[in-house]
Image: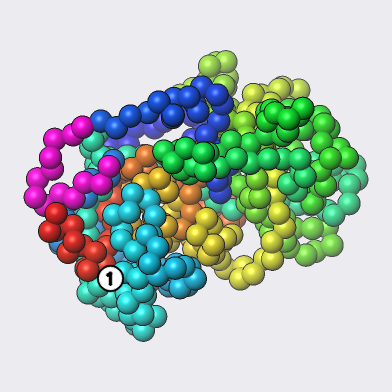
């Protein structure tokens, strides 16, 4: 149940972690010409909304539910409730709109704030106020689940021989275009570039930027001591930087240069440097470290480049702020495809994950959708946030597993699906 993918997709196979980008004229043309396909009518207990298929279940039908620990998920869900409270109550929650309006979730949020903190009380809260639905699409219920983490780098606010790799803020000439403003069918897709002679042209690639094309055009936020670490920071999209004065700061995704992400794991496989079964974030990093004369050339095959913003560290026990605008929680936050799923929804993942000492283990966990990413594309697709440090980095780097998941909807919303 766990065939591995052949690239470093698990290492955030898009540096555009906080934003989804539609990239290139061919992609744009294909999206404009995209038409809907007819499907057979679903059975009565299945609610179908475009690509998402929801099959009603009982909690007793959810594998592993009765043994689960939902305490971290409850805390994470409360933070999502804070985000709901800032939204228009009459707004649709998002995705394919199967989750209803914001106002449908506010009563549940009130109960969440009053729920007990014990393992039993947390489970009872979700059982009393939600109904689970198995998630699938036209191809079935099984999909790919990967992991990401918050890297920690060493840096400085001033450039030196030791700290020579810049982390740039967003350049003033970078233009990001929301294609949904021009074609409703492209809502959520974006391209980026710069204006030259009245036309939008591609922004410089990663290789050009690393070689200094932005000097004088963009301001470095910080300088770090390792170019390979910086490369993986771009893939993750956010991280912590321990400065040489002893202070810790956080940098987060601000923008991206608009180029498509190219997984260098695939590049190394095609070159015969790594095997399909042996590729992981760890093996890629090891290869780059062991081949300093070729590392930059390989990293340049990925033209995507991320621009950062400095953020307050906040609670060091929590992760960075995700796409929903709330801090991520270790093993309780999930990145999903926002074209299909709204942020803030609870999902039960039934699958596998890497074990700390090697190998794999069964992984059944309640996670709250609080983030997104350019590589997270599809109905049954998720990216688990594991936290920061070496342990989470090891697990996230090896997580490329198949699994299924279930979405929890408030009973009032679930009842509407049952009537369809």
Question: Residue, x 78% and y 65% (percent of image)?
Answer: 247
Q: In the picture shown, does residue 224 fall above or below 333?
A: above
Question: Residue, x 83% and y 53% (percent of image)?
Answer: 156
Q: Position of residue 200 (x, y in %)?
A: 68, 30
Q: Where is residue 306 in the image (x, y as percent from the top left)?
A: 66, 42
Which residue is at the far left?
44
Is residue 115 rendered to the left or right of residue 140? right
**Could you say which quadrant of the image residue 17 lies in?**
top right
* Colour scheme employed for the rendering of this structure: rainbow
Secondary structure character of the magenta stretch overall: loop
Question: Residue, x 49% and y 63% (percent of image)?
Answer: 329
Is residue 287 rendered to the left or right of residue 41? right
Image quarter in which the N terminus is found: top left
Asked if residue 57 shows in the view, the reply is no
Q: How many labels does the image show?
A: 1
Question: Residue, x 26% and y 40% (percent of image)?
Answer: 137
**Could you say which quadrant of the image residue 214 lies in?**
top right
Q: Which of 256 and 225 is in front in this view?
A: 256
Is residue 57 rendered to the left or right of residue 178? left
Q: Which of 187 and 330 is in front in this view?
A: 187
The verdict on residue 47 being magenta is yes
Q: In the picture shown, does residue 266 fall above or below 407?
A: above
The verdict on residue 58 being magenta is no
Q: Name the residue under label 1.
A: 126
Q: In the picture shown, does residue 289 fall above or below 339?
A: above
Which residue is at the far top?
271
- The local crowd at label 1, few if under 14, some if 14 to 19, many if 20 or more residues have their Cα within 10 Å, is many
Q: Position of residue 148 (x, y in %)?
A: 51, 48
Image quarter in which the C terminus is found: bottom left
Task: Magenta stretch: give its range.
Answer: 38-50
């Amino acid at each position: 149940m766990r065939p591995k993918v052949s690239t470093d997709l698990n290492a955030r196979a898009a540096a555009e972690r906080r934003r989804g980008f539609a990239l290139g004229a061919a992609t744009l043309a294909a999206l404009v010409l995209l038409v809907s396909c007819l499907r057979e009518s679903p059975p009565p207990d299945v609610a179908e909304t475009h690509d998402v298929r929801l099959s009603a279940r009982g909690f007793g039908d959810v594998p592993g539910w009765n043994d689960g620990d939902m305490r971290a998920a409850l805390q994470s869900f409360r933070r999502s409730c804070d985000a709901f409270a800032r939204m228009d109550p009459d707004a649709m929650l998002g995705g394919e709109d199967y989750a209803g309006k914001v106002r449908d979730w506010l009563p549940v949020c009130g109960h969440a704030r009053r729920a007990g903190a014990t393992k039993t009380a947390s489970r009872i809260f979700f059982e009393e106020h939600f109904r689970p639905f198995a998630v699938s699409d036209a191809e079935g219920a099984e999909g790919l689940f990967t992991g990401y983490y918050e890297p920690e780098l060493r840096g400085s606010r001033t450039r030196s021989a030791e700290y020579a790799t810049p982390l740039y803020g967003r350049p003033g000439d970078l233009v990001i275009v929301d294609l949904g403003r021009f074609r409703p069918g492209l809502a959520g897709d974006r391209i980026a570039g710069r204006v030259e002679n009245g036309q939008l042209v591609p922004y410089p690639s990663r290789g050009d930027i690393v070689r200094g094309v932005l000097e004088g055009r963009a301001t470095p936020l910080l300088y770090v001591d390792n170019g390979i670490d910086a490369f993986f920071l771009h893939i993750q999209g956010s991280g912590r930087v321990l400065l040489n004065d002893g202070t810790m700061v956080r940098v987060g995704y601000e923008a991206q240069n608009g180029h498509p992400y190219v997984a260098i794991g695939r590049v190394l496989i095609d070159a015969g440097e790594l095997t399909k079964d042996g590729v992981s974030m760890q093996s890629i990093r090891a290869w780059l470290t062991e081949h300093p004369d070729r590392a930059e050339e390989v990293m340049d095959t990925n033209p995507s480049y991320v621009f950062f913003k400095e953020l307050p560290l906040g609670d060091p026990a929590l992760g960075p702020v995700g796409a929903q605008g709330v801090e991520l929680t270790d093993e309780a936050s999930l990145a999903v495809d926002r074209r299909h799923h709204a942020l803030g929804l609870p999902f039960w993942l039934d699958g596998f994950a890497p074990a700390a000492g090697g190998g794999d283990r069964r992984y059944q966990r309640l996670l709250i959708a609080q983030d997104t990413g350019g590589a997270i594309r599809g109905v049954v697709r998720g990216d688990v946030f594991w936290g920061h440090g070496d342990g989470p980095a090891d697990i996230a780097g090896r997580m490329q597993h198949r699994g299924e998941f279930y979405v929890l909807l408030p009973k009032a919303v679930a009842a509407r699906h049952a009537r369809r």
